[in-house]
Image (cartoon, rainbow, N blue to C red):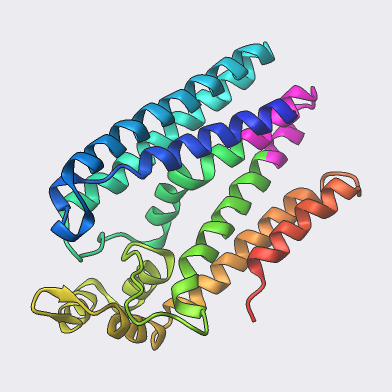
């Protein structure tokens, strides 16, 4: 199980390294020499691939085909989720996806939840637990990851000291919920109002979103997924490990 945890972390780190690749077509002269950026991209690709190769080697050493299948499908989900994020970002400029929160959840599970959920399930498979226990572990991982992602999305809107120039993802949970409450047309108008000479004023748009219901609804959604994760843990006997997992949930669902 410790080896599995290390493999999961390797896959996650490899993805973060690959996500650090710079889009050279968007470079400004102030970003530095083009050759340095090109070299950095090559190193990021090679480093990420090296980590993934080590993860695959570790999976093979576990000698459990079900675990290999679970982690392989999680990697496939990750690639699919990130590919969707990148293809959308390339098409649209400052305009969010026309999606509801249910579609957002599906896409976020692929890019942020699948790896943790399937790793938790695989840990139970290694311990030779039955399908029901494996499913509870999967549910904990899934809802924990969703709760953590929503908490992360909320930070630009709930931090007491937020930089005026601090940007945020226009497809994050509070923004998608804000758009759902407001309606697509009104939301596009708000984005246009916050633009000055084609540049989006994030500080102005942030205040507009905070004045709506999106932020409070995102907090409620974060707590909902946290409670679902805690429900899944109730099927396991009380232990120090279970308490640690519960404390992780409490940490991401606590808002002052």
Place of residue 2 in the rendered image (x, y in percent of width and height, measured from the top left) = 74, 30
- The foreground one among 152 and 224 is 152
Total labels: the figure holds 0
- The foreground one among 113 and 55 is 55
Q: Which corner quadrant holds the N terminus?
A: top right
In this picture, is 96 found above or below 58? Answer: below
| Residue 131 seen in this snapshot | no
User: Residue at 8% across / 78% down in the picture?
Assistant: 197
Q: Which corner quadrant holds the C terminus?
A: bottom right
Place of residue 4 in the rendered image (x, y in percent of width and height, measured from the top left) = 67, 28
Place of residue 70 in the rendered image (x, y in percent of width and height, measured from the top left) = 57, 25
Residue 153 left/right relative to 129: left
- The foreground one among 83 and 212 is 83
User: Residue at 67% across / 33% down in the picture?
Assistant: 5
Q: Which residues are magenta?
A: 119-137
- Where residue 131 sits, quadrant-wise, is top right
User: Residue at 49% across / 75% down in the picture?
Assistant: 217
Q: Assess whether residue 125 is covered by the magenta stretch.
A: yes
- The foreground one among 151 and 102 is 151
Residue 104 left/right relative to 53: left
């Amino acid at each position: 199980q410790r080896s599995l945890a290390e493999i999961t972390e390797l896959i996650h780190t490899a993805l973060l390294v690959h996500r650090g690749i710079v889009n050279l077509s968007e470079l400004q002269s102030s970003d530095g020499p083009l050759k340095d950026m090109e070299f950095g991209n090559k190193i990021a690709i090679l480093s990420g691939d090296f980590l993934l190769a080590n993860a695959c080697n570790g999976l093979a050493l576990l000698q459990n085909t079900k675990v290999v299948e679970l982690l392989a499908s999680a990697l496939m989900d990750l690639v699919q989720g990130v590919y969707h994020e990148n293809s959308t970002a390339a098409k649209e400029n400052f305009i969010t996806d026309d999606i509801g929160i249910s579609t957002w959840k599906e896409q976020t599970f692929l890019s942020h939840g699948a790896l943790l959920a399937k790793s938790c399930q695989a840990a139970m498979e290694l311990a030779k637990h039955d399908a029901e226990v494996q499913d509870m572990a999967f549910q904990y991982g899934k809802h924990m990851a969703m709760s953590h992602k929503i908490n992360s999305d909320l930070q630009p809107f709930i931090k007491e000291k937020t930089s005026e120039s601090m940007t945020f993802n226009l497809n994050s949970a509070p923004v998608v919920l804000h758009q759902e409450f407001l309606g697509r047309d009104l939301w596009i108008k708000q984005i246009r109002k916050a633009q000055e000479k084609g540049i989006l004023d994030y500080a102005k748009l942030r205040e507009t979103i905070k004045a709506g219901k999106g932020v409070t609804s995102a907090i409620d959604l974060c707590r909902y997924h946290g409670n679902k994760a805690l429900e899944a843990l109730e099927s396991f006997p009380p232990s120090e490990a279970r308490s640690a997992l519960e404390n992780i949930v409490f940490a991401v669902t606590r808002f002052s």
